[in-house]
Amino acid sequence: MIHTISNIRVRYAETDRMDVVYHSNYLIWFETARILMLDQIGIPYLDIEARGLLLPVLTASAAYKRPARFDDRLEVHLYMRDKPRARFRFEYEVKRERELLATGTTTHGFMDKDGKGLRPPKDFLDKIETAWVHDITAIV
Amino acid sequence: MIHTISNIRVRYAETDRMDVVYHSNYLIWFETARILMLDQIGIPYLDIEARGLLLPVLTASAAYKRPARFDDRLEVHLYMRDKPRARFRFEYEVKRERELLATGTTTHGFMDKDGKGLRPPKDFLDKIETAWVHDITAIV
Amino acid sequence: MIHTISNIRVRYAETDRMDVVYHSNYLIWFETARILMLDQIGIPYLDIEARGLLLPVLTASAAYKRPARFDDRLEVHLYMRDKPRARFRFEYEVKRERELLATGTTTHGFMDKDGKGLRPPKDFLDKIETAWVHDITAIV
Amino acid sequence: MIHTISNIRVRYAETDRMDVVYHSNYLIWFETARILMLDQIGIPYLDIEARGLLLPVLTASAAYKRPARFDDRLEVHLYMRDKPRARFRFEYEVKRERELLATGTTTHGFMDKDGKGLRPPKDFLDKIETAWVHDITAIV
């Protein structure tokens, strides 16, 4: 398993008139967490795209348990629990201290610029293999 | 079943550097569709909140099949297939003409301002009952 | 002068915890209005980009007089008061019925994909010349 | 003068299909910078609102000189150059290392929850007076 933690401070713009974080913003935080994990594994997202590859979101889900609010300091825990084959699957937990606010999942697949599905490059899989044993804690 | 269709024209701001609609924006379109359906049923969202009720998103999911792009004219089909009891469940399809771009679901529950879960008000359920037989097509 | 009107219905996602529209969203509405005006003039933004041209925002300003709120039906009035030379300048008024909520301006210049500034293509200027006499009212 | 620096790492969601940061996002970064400066001065925005006060944006402007791009590490420099009387005025510079990408200004006024304009509370002005001599550098 690979596990990273990223820190989010809730922006005013992310709230809505219910005085909570508008629910679609969690997907943006999930992405921030993914980009951090990819950095930590050694495959920065910019490098992926520089090689002509894309890693689009195929599915996304979230379950909202308790609301996040303006100025909250949150942790986004990201877990890669299965070594990727064709697909990458990520699991998320959004926490405010010990309190679990939301969970989520996303799945992704590699594509070229024409939208053709591709298997993950071997060097990416190797780097994931290397990172697998580490439980990385990182901050963005 | 209740079915409504809302029209979306993709905004420049909704795209990302992959030249597609950024995936979290679909959740915003889903909400636009819900608000339209509630209008059509006769329970405008403003009225819900004016009665001290909230209808937050409990879960959301989306599956992205083909990308939406800048300036696309899209239809968001919204289906309420089960009469709500404690929970409201909505299903979504985003289409560009005949092409299915994405599907999604959301679930919702009524709460008061203190976050206490509530059953849907009887007059809401009555209005849904009335709307059930109609297949409404509406445009926003 | 060229004048167009576009209609906006305020999305829940556009509000913030102050129960008003978050201020940066007006810039997005301004763009929606520009794209509509360009459509009406006969130079759709997609065509501009298909010719390898970009029309980025060089400056933007807004003055917020009264708050817009969730579900408001707004009109964005867009005025091109000066025939463009190197720069395009647009002026905006956001209204809720007779009430003026906000004003704004943006300026723009043509660029190629490498960021090199360009004069507006002659056929664009010709189309603006043709549109100049008309006071167009359009709805998006 | 009071000067603070906040750090931004550009999110994928903040880009658009021109492969640059969509222009309205700078206003969100400006706000992040203001909230940080208010923290540093000792008047956290949550405290302002807890006292029943709001500090809405009255005007905002931005000039875009060079594009910010995905994953850029940016500094938002915020300057309060004039001690506030009725109005607060902030000036912004967005930099990528030594390169100036954008400048901006916002003005703000205190209001109560009914939208009535108020003078800034005396203790806020006192805290600003105290902070005035310091050139604060802070990171969010």
Image: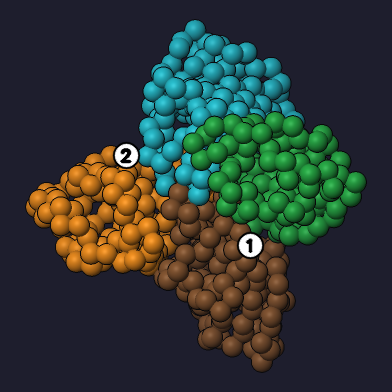
Chain colours: A orange, B brown, C green, D cyan
Vertical placement of C25 versus D112: above or below? below
Vertical placement of D2 versus A49: above or below? above
How many residues crowd mark 2 within 10 Å: few (<14), some (14–19), many (20+)? Answer: few
Return the mark for residue A140: 2
Q: Position of residue C139 (x, y in %)?
A: 78, 59
Which one is nearer the viewer's eye here, C55 or D36? C55
Question: Most extreme residue toward the top, as rendered?
Answer: D133
Which one is nearer the viewer's eye here, D68 or A136? D68
Image point (51%, 40%), residue name:
C113
Residue B33 seen in this snapshot: no
Corner quadrant of residue A26 = bottom left
For discs 1 and 2, the disc positioned in front in the rendered view? 1
Which one is nearer the viewer's eye here, C66 or A27? A27
Image point (36%, 53%), residue name:
A30
Amino acid type at mark 2: Val
Amino acid type at mark 1: Arg
Residue C86 seen in this snapshot: yes
Q: Position of residue C42 (x, y in %)?
A: 75, 54
Q: Position of residue D78 (x, y in %)?
A: 52, 22
Quadrant (top left/top right/bottom left/bottom right) for the N terminus of chain D: top right
Could you tell me which chain the residue with mark 1 belongs to? B
Return the mark for residue B9: 1
